[in-house]
Amino acid sequence: MFDLLIRGGAVADGAGREPTPADIGIVGDRIAAIGDLAGSQGEELDATGLLVAPGFIDIHSHSDYTLLADPRAVSAIYQGVTTEVVGNCGHGCFPIRDPDLALKAIYGYSDSVPLDWNSASGYFSRLEQAEPALNVVSMVPHGQLRLAVVGLTDRPSTEEELEEMSQLLRTALDEGAWGLSTGLEYATEAGASESEVTRLCAPLAERDDLYVCHARYRDAGAPEGVAEAIRTARVAGVRLQVSHLVPRSGDADMEECLELVDEARRHLDVAFDLHTRLFGFTYLYSVLPPWAMADGPQGLASVLADADARRRMKSFRSILSAGGDWERIVLLDHDAYPDYGRRSIRSIAAERGQEGLDCIYDLLLGAIETMESLMVLIDCHNAGQHRTAFAHPLSMPASDATTMAPDGPLAGKTFHGAYTWASYFYNFSVNQEGVLTPGEAAHRLSGLPAQRLGLVDRGVLKQGAFADIAVFDPTGFREKATRFEPNVLAEGMVHVLVNGQPVLRAGSLSGTRSGRVLRR
């Protein structure tokens, strides 16, 4: 007698083995049996003709805040995601001392949920109160450590500040975080030295926690950014996860980055993930140095209007300005600029008779109060890079996005990749390109990220494991959202179970939210 039976599917166990016909019996939140369960009793979910896999684990998500705003996680559930890892790229929701300053390292903030906590424990408790539909794991974001202690500046930390950040990090790890993430390319962390990050990794080595690195350079000089991450991990003696390894600077740099990881694998526990978009996605204000943003919107308005300040800002190497190719930076739709949406900065600047950076400074100045919703795409990847990177045995896909929903509190908001990452990865890798088998793709989406994190009894389908399960049409699971219409649900996902409870049943949300905050 089972609480739930999944009948008639082909089971991919998440360990890389190819699917085999089997039923799954569930009792409570665990898998009680796998095999021929004919004659067994329990509520049934029909999986005839479908693939049954472990629930997918998004190893690089930015849903820290959107899961508070709308805990249904609709965009993720419709892709079979049962666990999200937040706190990535140095962005996240703790530690917080100055809520206004903390916004510089939080994706998706909307003021619907006030930032009235300051610690990892406080954030985890608030997340538990929200009752998310999926499980949540969090890293400690280095950007928030620096904002809390050093402030918004591009200088290295002092010895006293480093010790204070180390204590905040240890406290967050004690309260349940799973490691440390950096986003060294961002203004909030650009001032951090390699030695600072190496010393902050010391508590991770003591606990065998993971160091997750968005490298300092992801455009020109990208291989050196990966090399720095490897040096840091090797000296600190920690396990390393390189975020979105494929750089924005072309095939040659990508090959060199892959070679660096392969070489490091001989002496270091290292792997990498990558988002599944053919473009990057970030804030337009990412072009600004930290000092320009230190005094809030009105202070920034004065800086942007000052010719001398502009000359100084132009020397700052940002996530957008490397290479100066403004044709590949595309402004997304925004109420302040209805005529400029979906056009390149080069095109907009030419129309205005300006150089690229001056055009950007004026765009920011004209939307100073809504600057945090001015977003851009960075055209930078191609399908060939995806074929190569997805086939690599150390790679795994990730959303690099926030959870979204086409209705409710997040309706009308966008984050590219939210509705497409897992569905694109499976469809592209298995059905279109054939670079992975169904069993291998399931492993990359579940078992491999679980291993990297150290998650016990998740990411696999076996007796005694947690019943986090995705049941989908292996030939019909695909993305439907597009570059400029990003808020369309993926199709082909039929049933999704989180901790033994169906949150998606026969293609429709059940209303159940059975996720858990997974503390280390």
Image (cartoon, helix red, strand yellow):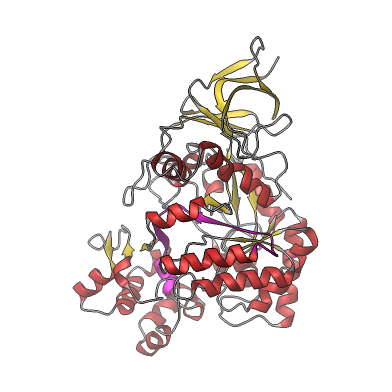
Q: Position of residue 346 (x, y in %)?
A: 26, 71
Q: Tell which of 246 and 204 is nearer to you.
A: 246
Judged left or right of residue 319, residue 60 is right
Residue 322 falls in image quadrant: bottom left
Give me the residue at 53% from left, 63% from top: 258
Is residue 274 covered in magenta?
yes
Q: Tell which of 443 and 121 is nearer to you.
A: 443
Residue 408 falls in image quadrant: top left
The residue furthest right is 206
The residue furthest top is 39
Report the magenta residues as a range.
Answer: 265-287
Q: Position of residue 277 (x, y in %)?
A: 41, 54
Is residue 180 covered in magenta?
no
Task: Look at the picture and state if 210 lies above or below 58.
Answer: below
The residue furthest bottom is 308
Q: State whether residue 96 appears in this view.
A: no
Task: Look at the picture and state if 448 lies above or below 208.
Answer: above
Task: Look at the picture and state if 453 lies above or below 47.
Answer: below
Q: How many marks are shown on the rendered structure?
A: 0
Give me the residue at 71% from left, 68% from top: 201
Q: State whether residue 16 appears in this view.
A: yes
Look at the image and tell me in which quarter the N terminus lies.
Answer: top right
Q: Tell which of 345 and 262 is nearer to you.
A: 262
Judged left or right of residue 441, residue 414 is left
Q: Position of residue 406 (x, y in %)?
A: 40, 41
Q: Tell which of 470 and 149 is nearer to you.
A: 470
